[in-house]
Image: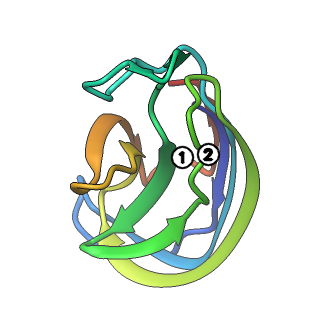
């Protein structure tokens, strides 16, 4: 998943835990070569693949959630989120999930340390 991650942070917390205070500026762009999480890969002659989306929880609260891209292993979200936070956390987690009739299934995740102000990564 290609994403940019920019956050301003305040002081406090322990050596391993920083206080994320201020604006969390997220731009979730895309993912490449996601695995097919659907059990039935064929439906009426068509290949069926995952329906991915990204969820961003911080200390148990979901602060960002992209739209679902149906039937794609190369989803492009290109979504921008600006969230005001005041949470004590050591990291921010990006979860890529497959939306399914029977519930979401985790495809993969990236955990970014709160000490970084700007990060670009690919999942």
Q: In the figure, 94 relative to 9: above or below?
A: above
Front-most of residues 47 and 10 = 47
Q: SS at mark 2?
A: loop
Front-most of residues 25 and 40 = 40
**Quarter of the image where the N terminus is located:** top right
Q: In the figure, 16 relative to 120: above or below?
A: below
- Residue lying at 25% horizontally and 25% vertically, measured from the top left: 39
Instruction: Point out residue 8 in the picture as x, y percentages from the top left corner.
Output: 63, 68
Q: Tell me if 123 is positioned left or right of 2 in this view.
A: left
Q: Counting other residues with Cα less than 10 Å from the Cα at mark 1, is it few (<14), some (14-19), or many (20 or more)? A: few
Q: In the figure, 59 relative to 86: above or below?
A: above
Q: SS at mark 1?
A: loop
The tag earlier along the polypeptide, 1 or 2, is 2
Q: Counting other residues with Cα less than 10 Å from the Cα at mark 2, is it few (<14), some (14-19), or many (20 or more)? A: some
Instruction: Point out residue 11 in the picture as x, y percentages from the top left corner.
Output: 44, 74
- Residue lying at 58% horizontally and 24% vertically, measured from the top left: 122
Q: Is residue 12 visible?
A: no
Q: Tell me if 97 is positioned left or right of 21 in this view.
A: left
Front-most of residues 61 and 13 = 61
Mark 1 or mark 2, which is nearer to you? 2
Q: Is residue 120 visible?
A: yes
Q: In the figure, 100 relative to 60: above or below?
A: above
- In the rendered view, how is the structure colored? rainbow
Provide the residue designation for mark 2. 69
């Amino acid at each position: 998943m290609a994403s940019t991650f920019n956050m301003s942070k305040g002081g406090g917390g322990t050596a391993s835990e920083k206080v994320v205070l201020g604006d969390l500026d997220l731009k979730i762009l895309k993912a490449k070569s996601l695995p097919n999480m659907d059990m039935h890969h064929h439906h009426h002659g068509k290949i069926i693949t995952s329906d991915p989306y990204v969820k961003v929880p911080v200390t148990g609260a979901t602060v960002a959630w992209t739209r679902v891209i149906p039937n794609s292993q190369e989803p492009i979200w290109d979504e921008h989120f600006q969230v005001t936070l005041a949470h004590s956390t050591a990291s921010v987690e990006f979860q890529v999930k497959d939306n399914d009739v029977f519930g979401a299934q985790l495809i993969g995740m990236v955990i970014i340390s709160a000490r970084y102000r700007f990060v670009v990564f690919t999942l």
